[in-house]
Every structure is written in structure tokens, then in C-alpha cells.
């Protein structure tokens, strides 16, 4: 059965709510969908969730892959990316990860070290 936008809007008018599930670290979360979201969600829920949160799909998939831990944005003395987590705990919600990913771990000066940010 193919649902067009008019049918989806009629369903909402009839009192039907739209919800969906997306993956999250250690499980999943339920999200509310507006009628205009349904087609995009069905097409690619990962892309839909990322865009709804002002992010790229790759950032969303990284959030899941790192179990919600923002990673340090510094480079090691060998020039490779640091693999430490940003100080302050683990399993942040997606919006928090977007704000903190690329900050610095305790080894590289923490989030307020301007000297480290310039490197």
C-alpha cells in the first residue's frame, strides 16, 4: 500500500499519531513524526533523524558506533587522531555529542585549552 501525503494528513486528522524508532547507543529511542516526515522516515530513518537534529547521517552513525562518547579532536605526537573520549562522562544524547565531539580529552588540555585548539 502506497500512502500519499493527502492520505497521511487525513490519518492525522482522524487522530492517528505517527511514531518511529531509531537506533541509539545501547538500544533505541522513539521519535514523534509529523505527517510531512513520514515519507522521509520510511525512505531512510537514519538520514531523517540526523537531519532533524541538524547533523549529517555519518555523525549519527558515529554516535551509535562510539556508544555515545564524544571523541577527542587532537592529534597524537605521531600525527594520528587521539582515540580518547572527551572528559565528562559517556553516552551523551545525540545533541550533546554534536556539541562536544572534537573537543579535547584530559591528556590534550580539556575543552578550554586554546593552546591545544591552535595545533
Image (cartoon, helix red, strand yellow):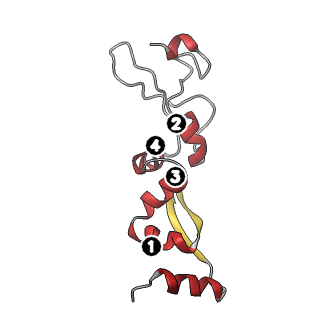
Instruction: State if disc 3 and disc 2 touch (CB < 8 Å).
Output: no
Q: Are marks 1 and 2 in contact (CB under 8 Å)?
A: no
Residue position marked by numbered label 4 in the rendering: 66
Residues at circles 3 and 4 in contact by the CB criterion of under 8 Å: yes
Residue 70, which numbered label? 2
The numbered dot on residue 39 is 1
- Nearer the camera: disc 1 or disc 2: 1
Q: Earlier in the sequence, mark 1 or mark 3?
A: 3
Instruction: Give whichever of 67, 2 is nearer the camera.
Output: 2
Image height of 88 relative to 8, above or below: above
Q: Residue at x 52, y 17 (%)?
A: 107
Tell me where residue 35 sits by quadrant: bottom right
Residue at image coords 43%, 48%: 56
Q: Are marks 4 and 1 in contact (CB under 8 Å)?
A: no
Percent x, y of residue 40: 44, 67
Side (left or right) of 5 relative to 93: left
Say few, some or many: other residues with alpha carbon within 10 Å of mark 4 (under 14 / 14 to 19 / 20 or more): some
Between discs 4 and 1, the one toward the N terminus = 1
* Residues at marks 1 and 2, CA–CA distance in whole angstroms: 31 Å
Task: Label 3: state its secondary structure.
Answer: loop
Amino acid at each position: 500500500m502506497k500512502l500519499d501525503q493527502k492520505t497521511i494528513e487525513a490519518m492525522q486528522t482522524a487522530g492517528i499519531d505517527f511514531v518511529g524508532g531509531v537506533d541509539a547507543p545501547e538500544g533505541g529511542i522513539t521519535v514523534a513524526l509529523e505527517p510531512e516526515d513520514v515519507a522521509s522516515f520510511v525512505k531512510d530513518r537514519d538520514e531523517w533523524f540526523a537531519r532533524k537534529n541538524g547533523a549529517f547521517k555519518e555523525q549519527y552513525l558515529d554516535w551509535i558506533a562510539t556508544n555515545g562518547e564524544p571523541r577527542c579532536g587532537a592529534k597524537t605526537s605521531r600525527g594520528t587522531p587521539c582515540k580518547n573520549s572527551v572528559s565528562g562522562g559517556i553516552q551523551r544524547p545525540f545533541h550533546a555529542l554534536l556539541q562536544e565531539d572534537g573537543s579535547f580529552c584530559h591528556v590534550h588540555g580539556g575543552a578550554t585549552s586554546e593552546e591545544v585548539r591552535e595545533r
